[in-house]
Image (cartoon, helix red, strand yellow):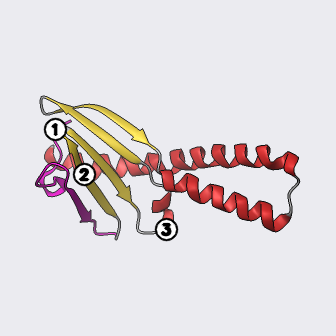
Amino acid sequence: MSKISKEFLPFQLGETKKVVLKNGSSITTKWEKENKYIIRYKPENYADYFSPYFLFEFEDGMLKRTIPFPNKRSFVYMILILIGFVLYKGIKPDMYLTFFSFSIIFTFILQIVVGLPAYRHIMTNVFEKNEK
């Protein structure tokens, strides 16, 4: 895999660059450190709260490692929804742990379901343009 396409690269270290794609979605690239970039695909709908971030590390101009990490806002939203549900429905205190566990597991599954297509979009749009 070659380097990131020039249209997605920020100009300076620490800078973020956002590129809007034809379908309304966007790809945001942040130059974190030398040879490290954080890339996030944001769909055109409101699922961007659940789209994870990906850290791409390069060594000698080649992709060395890709590390996905979850979007923290999705966990905050899930906990707020859980608190609202518990207060509104009057759930018994012995069920709190069950609901909390379910919300964490559901959020992780949602991160994976949204993350796989996001990773595919990143690899297609950001990297394959250099190979053509």
Depth order, front residue of 86/103: 86
Residue 12 sits inside the magenta stretch: yes
* Quadrant location, the N terminus: top left
SS class, disc 1: loop
Q: In front: mark 2 or mark 3?
A: 2
What whole-number distance in Å separates the C-alpha atoms at marks 2 and 3?
Answer: 21 Å
Q: Can residue 132 be seen in this view?
A: no
Mark 1 and 3 residues: CB-CB less than 8 Å, in contact?
no
Question: What span is in magenta?
Answer: 1-23
Residue 66, compared with residue 20, is above or below; it is above
Give the residue at x 14% y 57%.
7
N-terminal of the two: label 1 or label 3? 1
Please rate how many residues cluster around mark 2, counting C-alpha atoms within 10 Å: few if below 14, some from 14 to 19, many from 20: many
**Amino acid at the residue labelled 1:** Glu
Residue 18 sits inside the magenta stretch: yes
Give the residue at x 15% y 43%.
131
Q: In front: mark 1 or mark 3?
A: 1
**Amino acid at the residue labelled 2:** Lys
Q: Name the residue under label 2.
A: 30
What whole-number distance in Å separates the C-alpha atoms at marks 1 and 2?
Answer: 11 Å
53 sits left or right of 32 in the view: right
Q: Name the residue under label 1.
A: 34
SS class, disc 2: strand
Give the residue at x 16% y 54%.
10
Give the residue at x 13% y 33%.
61
Q: Mark 3 points at which residue?
A: 46
Mark 1 and 2 residues: CB-CB less than 8 Å, in contact?
no
Mark 2 and 3 residues: CB-CB less than 8 Å, in contact?
no
